[in-house]
Amino acid sequence: MILWPKCAKSCLIETSLSCRVPSDRAMRNRWITIIRSSREEQKWKPSARTCICSEHFRDNDFYRVTATGPRRLKKSVIPTQALFFASLKHNGEESAGNDSDDSSTDITIEEIHFEEDSSDLDSVYDTPKESKLRRELRRKIARNRKHLIKIEKLQRKHTQVKTRVCELKSMIKELKKKKKKNADWWDDETRRMVVEKKKAWPDVLATQATNRVSLGGMNKVKECIEKKRNEKKVWKRFGESETEIGNSNRQCAVPLQICRPGGQHEWQKADNIQAWLHTKTIVFMDLELKAELLLKFNKDDYIKKFY
């Protein structure tokens, strides 16, 4: 059994000829006004499948391109026949003055064989309760359609965002490859300076190590001399020996004072420490003490130089 679509204007006649709502904005608005008045729904809007059957048009509203060809509806006509509501004020005279034989502005009448449209009018035989339920159903269907459209838009937006994220990831990957391949900041001048500093770095480390050893040896010498000074074995003098020191130069026969950095003798440099140990103003009462000091300083090259 073939199911014909119901007319949007509550037509109960089953027919295979139906006309879609025109796409021209002015004519479309006129059709919508008529259908809204018939349905008593001011917010009604036609769907993509909304159709009006041929029973609502006059015979002279149609024409044939060929004698055996399909009938076509003239563009400037509106539905005026078999309307159920008295509120509709359109009549046949309004459309009669707008007849036209121009085939380039026609609306093709399509033979439709799909299922029932959701925008159909209430049947005239419906009870008030059924009509109310039907209108409520239409409102819910329209709300559901809006939700579906919104979901579809969000899905498209989500797809666009995912595509953009993939593009940005690809760009980041390419930039990382380019940076790894071409390092613009690593020019020849920078490379030369780095190579020179690498070559000089062992000398810097050796100098720092020498300074640390020198300071350590200096502290050992200071401790040893302070210990011997307390034992009165090291004296600062200008004479041959302690017994030859007279009253005139007794001020020179004082115990040895350890000099601080920046004083009479500099303790920071190894050469000055060695020279201080061998200065003529220092007399070691025994050679073992002198050897002990030099060994504690732990500088064999200086020991060989000054012995």
Image (cartoon, grey):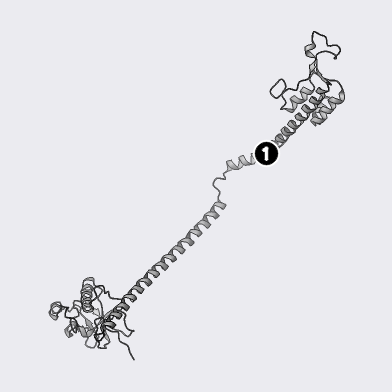
Q: Is residue 48 visible?
A: no
Residue extending farthest to the bottom is 1
Q: Is residue 137 above or below residue 298?
A: below
In the figure, is residue 207 to the left or right of 140?
Answer: right
Label 1: how many Cα within 10 Å (few below 14, some 14–19, many 20+): few
Q: Secondary structure at mark 1?
A: helix
- Give coordinates of residue 63: x percent, y percent: 20, 83
Going 77% across and 25% down the picture, which residue do you hit? Answer: 274
Q: Amino acid at mark 1?
A: Trp
In the figure, is residue 269 to the left or right of 185?
Answer: right
Q: Toward which corner of the image does residue 134 lie, by quadrant?
A: bottom left
In the figure, is residue 271 to the left or right of 120?
Answer: right
Q: Toward which corner of the image does residue 226 lie, by quadrant?
A: top right
- Give coordinates of residue 305: x percent, y percent: 81, 26
- Give coordinates of residue 216: x percent, y percent: 75, 32
Q: Which residue is mark 1?
A: 201
* Quadrant assignment for the C terminus: top right
Q: Toward which corner of the image does residue 300 lie, by quadrant?
A: top right
